[in-house]
Image (spheres, rainbow, N blue to C red):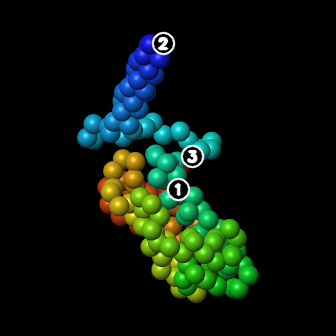
């Protein structure tokens, strides 16, 4: 008879825990993001979201790798695969699928273009563009290009 109250308490605790879990894992209302407040990764971080921060970080790695490659070989890499082991550019970074973004790259020996296109463009997913001048440009309404404003 003593085990019945213990079982009741245990069942109640399990049900309360499940109810809390269900509340925490409820999907956000359509149009809302679960954590819409972006926390900057460093002072002066221009990103509007974690996705943008990742895309911009990828671009900075490619730009640095291209500068290093150009210094070492006297020309830019014509493919992302050529950049492997140049700076911190790794073999996995050759993959164009970058989460919420797709990387695009066109290289010539005297120039290159790197674009990051969001899979869904919105206020937290701008498009980005960079070339051999090393400046990252962005646009929130259309694909970024050489005429887009520099991302600050």
| Residue drawn 41% across the image and 58% down it | 100
Q: Position of residue 104 (x, y in %)?
A: 44, 73
Q: In the image, is residue 15 above or below residue 51?
A: above
Q: Kindly identify which residue carries mark 3.
A: 45
The residue beneath circle 1 is 54
Q: CA distance from mark 3 to mark 2?
A: 61 Å
| Relative image position of residue 115 (x, y in whole percent) | 45, 68
Q: Residue at x 57, y 58 (%)?
A: 57
Q: Name the secondary structure under disc 1.
A: helix
Q: Residue furthest left?
A: 30
Residue 2: image tag: 2
Q: Secondary structure at mark 2?
A: loop
CA gap, disc 3 and disc 1: 11 Å
The residue most toward the front is: 1
Which is nearer the eye, 3 or 47?
3
Q: Is residue 105 above or below residue 32?
A: below
Judge depth for marks 2 and 1 and give the one in front: 2
Which residue is drawn at the image coordinates 48% and 80% (left, top)? 106
Mark 1 neighbour class, 10 Å CA radius: few under 14, some 14 to 19, many 20 or more: some
């Amino acid at each position: 008879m003593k085990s019945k109250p213990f079982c009741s308490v245990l069942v109640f605790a399990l049900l309360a825990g499940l109810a809390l879990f269900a509340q925490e894992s409820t999907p956000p209302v359509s149009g809302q993001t679960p954590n819409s407040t972006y926390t900057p990764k460093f002072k002066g971080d221009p990103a509007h979201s974690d996705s943008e921060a990742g895309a911009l970080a990828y671009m900075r790695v490619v730009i640095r790798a291209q500068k290093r490659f150009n210094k070492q070989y006297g020309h830019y890499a014509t493919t992302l695969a050529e950049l492997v082991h140049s700076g911190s550019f790794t073999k996995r970074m050759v993959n164009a699928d970058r989460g919420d973004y797709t990387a695009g790259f066109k290289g010539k020996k005297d120039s290159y273009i790197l674009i990051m296109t969001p899979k869904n463009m919105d206020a937290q997913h701008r498009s980005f563009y960079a070339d051999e001048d090393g400046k990252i440009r962005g646009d929130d309404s259309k694909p970024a290009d050489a005429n887009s404003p520099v991302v600050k």
